[in-house]
Image (cartoon, helix red, strand yellow):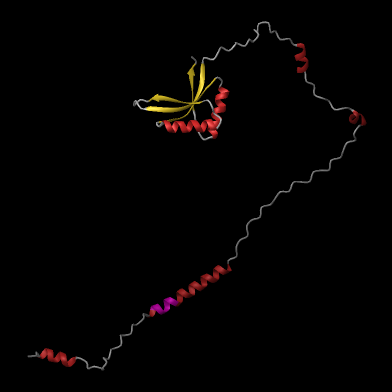
Amino acid sequence: MLNPIQIAAKGSRPKKGATRRSTPPPKRNTPWWLWLLVPAILALFIYGLTQLNQVKPQPKPVEKVKVAPKPAPVTKAPVKKEETAAAPKKDTFEFYQILQNSEVDTSHVDAYQSTPRGEQDFYYMLQAASFRNPEDADRMRARLILAGLVETDIRKTIGENQQPWYRVVLGPYLSRSKMNRAEDKLASMEISPYSYRINRE
């Protein structure tokens, strides 16, 4: 059964196709003082722009440059012929005469005597590389011999952990210059050698 409230609500619904009449929103009344304020602000802004336009930029003060007075023309004095004929004076150095007249006493100075060099009691050696594998050491030795370094040898040494090392060494060289030549050749082959000395037997 329908309630009377539901019946009234059904009757109040608009039919299809019918449009509701909307009431226009109420007009807002603008206060009277706003009509006076906006034109006054516009007039002040325009007045300020015209005043700024009339302001002229002040020119920068120009510094006065002081000009030096022109020097008076120099009049040349008459040159005497005697002055031009005279030769210019030369500087005299007296130390040449002082050295010639002085004597140096060398009686208390002993003559230098070169001491004869004793016989060298060591040889120069170069180590090119060291390997764990003897075959690698043989290959390095063959490469050095083919490069012209014939004083090449392989020496077996025992390391700290009781494992053998195969060192490729060059020498012995009696003079440092021969060792340096071999060292330069190794450097051209991109090998950094280690130099050391061994006692002569």
Q: Residue furthest left?
A: 1
Q: Residue at x 54, y 32 (%)?
A: 146
Q: Residue at x 78, y 20 (%)?
A: 93
Relative height, residue 198 to residue 83 (above, below): above
Q: Residue at x 56, y 22 (%)?
A: 176
Left/right placement of residue 177 relative to residue 161 reads right
Closer to the camera in the image, 20 or 142: 142
Quadrant where the N terminus is found in the figure: bottom left
Percent of width and height locating residue 184: 56, 30
Q: Main secondary structure of the magenta part?
A: helix
Quadrant in the picture for residue 174: top right
Q: Residue furthest top?
A: 107
All told, the count of numbered labels is 0
Q: Residue at x 24, y 93 (%)?
A: 16
Quadrant in the picture for residue 185: top right
Percent of width and height locating residue 102: 74, 11
Is-magenta flag for residue 28? no
Percent of width and height locating residue 70: 79, 46
Closer to the camera in the image, 66 or 145: 145
Left/right placement of residue 144 relative to residue 5 reads right
Percent of width and height locating residue 140: 48, 32
Quadrant in the picture for residue 86: top right
Magenta residues (range): 33-38
Closer to the camera in the image, 127 or 23: 127
Relative height, residue 23 to residue 121 (above, below): below
